[in-house]
Amino acid sequence: MERAFWGDLHPHCAVSYGNGLPERALDVARQHLDFCSITGHAFWPDMPMDLARQSAILTTHFGGFAKLAHFWKPLLAMLKRADEPGRFVTLPSYEWH
């Protein structure tokens, strides 16, 4: 028997430089979806490095990368607690541009 599963693989939340609590994203996802991954911004290898013209972008991104690195272990623990085998699956992830 084939079955479709519905989920969200790309909510950023405030674990890097997004907005909103990851707990809220998981609560909302649990009400409607089969799986969810809280995705933080982690790397951008080819990011423009022109500080004079791109300072806001650089500040935002490097701040977000550091924030995700700091909260990575607590985020993994949160996702593990929210996982409900057979009902709601959580997936740890990060975004690599």
Image: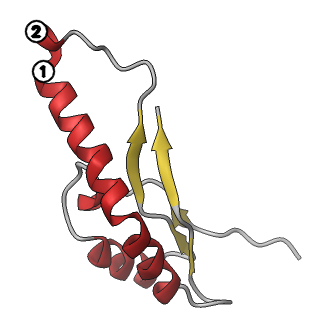
Which dot marks residue 97?
none
* Left or right, 47 with reference to 79: left
Work out whether residue 68 can be spotted: yes
- Residue situated in front as seen by the camera: 48 or 90: 48
Q: Quadrant of residue 71?
A: bottom left
Residue 75 located left or right of residue 36: left
- The image quadrant that residue 61 belongs to is top left
Q: Secondary structure at mark 2?
A: helix
Residue at image x 56%, y 68%? Answer: 91
Residue 80: give x, y in percent of width and height. Answer: 52, 83
Q: Which residue is mark 1?
A: 55
Instruction: Sort mark 1 into few (<14), some (14-19) or many (20+) by Cα contacts within 10 Å.
Output: few
Q: Are marks 2 and 1 in contact (CB under 8 Å)?
A: yes
- Residue 9 lies, in percent from the top left, at 50, 57
Q: Which residue is mark 2?
A: 52
**Mark 2 and mark 1: Cα distance apart in space:** 6 Å
